[in-house]
Each structure stands twice: as structure tokens, then as C-alpha cells.
Image (cartoon, grey):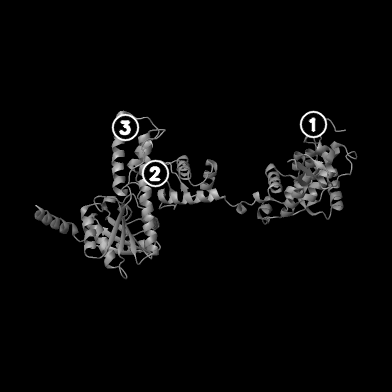
Amino acid sequence: MSPPRELFSQFPALVPLGNAETEEHEENAQDENEDDGPFAFEALSDSEEDKSPEQVLATGRRFKETLREEKPPRAQVGNSRKRRPGEVDSGFVLSKLTPDCLVKEQRQFCCKKTCLWNLGINRLRSERKRYFRLSRTERSVYLESLVTKLESGGVVFRLSQNLTVCRKAFKIIFCVGNSRLQRLRLQDKHPASIDTVARQPSAEAFILLEWLDSFFLSHCKRQPADGKYHLPNNFTKKEVYDYYRTDMVQVRECLQYSSFKHYWVKFYPLVTIPTTNKFSVCDFCELYKSKRDKGVTRIEKGILRKFLLVLELDLHEVHGRPLPCLHEPHGNPEAVQALKLHRKQQAEERAAARRRRWKALDSPKDCAYIQIDGMDQKKTALPHFSKQPKSVDGAALVGVHLVGAMIFHGKLHTRAFLTYNNLKSDSNLTITVLQKILLEWEGILPPTLYLQLDNTVRENKNNILFAYLAMLLEKKVFTKIKRGFFLVGHTHEFIDQMFSRFSQALRRENAFTMSRLRYVIENSYDPKPITSILTQTWDFKHFIETELKLFRTLLS
């Protein structure tokens, strides 16, 4: 008959014994357990009736005092060698095999059948000692052999002699937790579920990964500092999932939103949606983000209609096709539709630039891709200090402007042009940089040129530059020239990553002269950029204006 539950709390407090009995116990323990290694302690009797609970607890107290006296100093413990993986932690084992610990755990209430009480202290000690003598790998195999899964779905926990115990008693006997038991149950139920590498994504998952790859390439901006990819901060994951569902309606059944987020995090951990934008902000995105889900006044609706009209005309002019319907069932329909059109435009611009780059790398005989952009001149002012003192006046520094160029033609080539502040950053500078690249071209020029420039009217988006490009076509230098401009606020590309490498190198090194600045720039990026100092530019602007004035006179 099982003892009543109230009996578990009736053991008296520990009674300390004298030093004479302690010394006698130590001598007897050393004689009886000389070869037990870390498991050397006084053996318990085969029956609980041989000793009273007071005597058993007193024996445990004497044994703990013996361990405390034999414990090495703190300095020796700190200098001892590290325990290798798989080795038995003798300190933990000794603490779990002491009579004090065994009695304390054997008196715990586990279930109505009182498995621990019926097991007895000696059986508890022998089961635990057999388990701790095994290595770490052998322990896992041993526990797996003791856990049996039933056809009904339950689990049976057995001991070495086919004795059945409850779950709590099994955990106490072998000093394991819920997570360890859960892994054993999963391994017994689904052997392949433990090895996540062996699980292959489904066909729907592969389609999702292809869709995410295409979507991120079209919409993400690569951050020059850390190499991460940011979606515009007016996006949400739910909106991206809605785009995915819309595209998958006529293809295949799409995955649920939870699986969509799981594959995003697992296969695209570098793609995030920032809360704030560190770089230049797009006016369209910020406007529509603030108006997307809010009710607006009549004046604000009129402003949105004007922006939408400009965007529609721009898209119709560039792509030459009709626009979709503007009616949306939820939110602010005009703002939602305008934001979709804006995203579509910038995504198509990025996709076109990506196709042109790969085409120039794969077919250098047919085309070349050149991207030109300017770097922030505050980071290249001379003399440059890695840590600028407060006594240095920024107005006394000599401004140096850097114009970078990336040429994709079979492989990547990089150029860096340095100018002082006496040269204006206008269309003449852009034309001079492009002319120098073409004059120093190695080999034969391809028939097609793809030109990607910054979306600024002062330097690139003006009639002076377009007249120069028309002259190249008229002189048969190229048979076709395609220019590209990213939308304002969506201009971060590969060339910004090169500028970031320049900035990081300048944070670590001083550059007091122009020659030192060139050295730092040339050794901060791979492939190594060719640096040039521009002291003058061609006045193509005056030449074009003179010709245009003459042309207008002839027409009049």
C-alpha cells in the first residue's frame, strides 16, 4: 500500500554530528569505496528499514562536510583544465548522488502511484549511477531505449528492469528537462523532423522563393555600409504577401502568410523593412505612406489627384501602355493606386538596369554599361583627419569632389576622378568624365552603350548632355545609346557601395595630400580603381549653346 501524501513532509531537520564520528565515517568510506573514482561515497543498505530517516540524513550531512573539506582552493579550481565535450562532470554527479540529494528527491510527490517512493533510494542511486557512467552520446541512446511510443499516441517511460514510472519521476531520476524529453519524443515519432537540413521545401515553396528573388531584386536597395537590402519603408510584409497572392492566382495555390514569413526570414535574412530611412527620402513614398490609410480633406485629395496625374502621364510616356483601373475597395483608393504605380515604375527601372548590366557582362562585343555618380565631398576634403580635432576649422579645408564610374564590359572596371572646387559640378564635368572613359577605352567600342546617371537636372538631365549623346550617334561612335535615371529617393546602387568603401578607409587613415588621398582610394576597393585628377573640363555647354543659337536663327 502506498504511503499517504502527508508522510513526505514529516522528516525532522538535520542533526549535526561530532568531529569524531565524521573522521570515523571518512576512514570507512575510503576503505569501502577505494576504486569507485568520482562515485566514492558510503553505500546505502538494501532496505530502507535498516536505517531510520534521521540516520540517512545525518550520513548525507557528514558526507557533504567531507566533500567541503577535500575541496581544493579557489585558485586551483580556476587553473584546472577545461572539461572536454562528452566528459562526465564529476562535481555535478557527486551532488546528484549524495544521500542527502537522493533522500530529498525520493520524497518528492510525482503522481498518485508514488513512483519515486516505491522505487527506493538504492534503486534510484543505481539507476542514476548507471546513467552518469555513460558518455554524452551514450546517454542519449540509453534514454531513447527507455522511451517507448504507443500506437494510441502516448509515451511509456521504463527503467532498466522494465519498471514503468511516470514522466515526472523519469525526469527526476535521470536529471533531464522537458526539452530533452520533447526531442526524444519527436525523434521517436518523426525521425526526419530532427534533421531540418533533410527537409526539402515543397513545390509551392520553390515558386515562392523564385518570386521573392525577383521581387527583392526589383524593389530593394543595397545598403553600402553593411551590405543589407532594404525595402522602402512604406512597405509592410502583409502588402508584399498581397502582391504574392495576386501574382499566384493564375499560377498555383499560394502558401499561407505564416509560411511566407518563415521562408522570408530563413532564405532572405538580409532583406528588411527599416523603420526610418537613413538616406534621401522619396517625396512620393513619404506622401502616400502618410495618406494611404487615412481619410483626407478635399484639398488633400486634390493634391493627390495632381500627383497621380503627373505619375500617370510619366508612366504612359515611358512605357506607352494604358494604366490599370484606379478604383480600390479599401483605404484611400487614389493614394493606394498611386503608390502601386510609383512602386511599379521604380521596380521596372531597377529591373531594366539589372538586365543591362548582365547583358554587358555576358556579351561585351555587343554592349557596355557605364554608371556615373558623385560622392559627398565632405568626406574627401583636404587635409583629411581620421579623427578630426575640434580646433580644425572646416571652412579652412580644401574641398575635393570625387566622381566615380563603374564600367561593366566583360568584367567590372572602376574609375575615380578627383577635382577641386574651382571646377563646377555641371554637365561639362559629366561629359568630360564620359569622354575620358571613351578615349582611354581598351579595344574596340561596342555598338550599344547603356548609360546610368544620377537623376539631377544640373549635371545630367539637360539638353547639353543629350546633345553630346546625339553627337556620338551622329559621329557613328555608337549605333544606339540608352540612358537610365533612377527615381529620386531610389538611387542607391552598386556605385554607392564603392563610395562606402572609400569612406570606411578614410575613417581609418589620414590623408593630408592629394597623392595620399589617391593611395587610400586605390587600395580600398576591389577591383582597384584608376584615379585621375581633373584640372580642367571641356566647355561643351558653350559649344552647344552657340550651335543651338545658330540653328534657331536659321529656323526663324
First of labels 3, 1 by sequence position: 1
What kind of element bears circle 2?
A: loop
* Three-letter code, disc 3: Lys
Mark number displayed over residue 172 = none
* Three-letter code, disc 2: Asn
Name which residue lies at 69% across and 42% down: 178
Q: Is residue 45 left or right of residue 515?
A: right
Image location of residue 381, percent across then percent down: 30, 55
Considering only vertical position in the picture, is 55 above or below 459?
A: above
What kind of element bears circle 3?
A: helix
Find out whether the residues at labels 1 and 2 contact each other: C-beta distance under 8 Å: no
* Residue that mark 2 sits on: 277
Q: Is residue 499 left or right of residue 35?
A: left
Sort mark 1 into few (<14), some (14-19) or many (20+) by Cα contacts within 10 Å.
few
Considering only vertical position in the picture, is 528 above or below 316?
A: below
* Three-letter code, disc 1: Ser
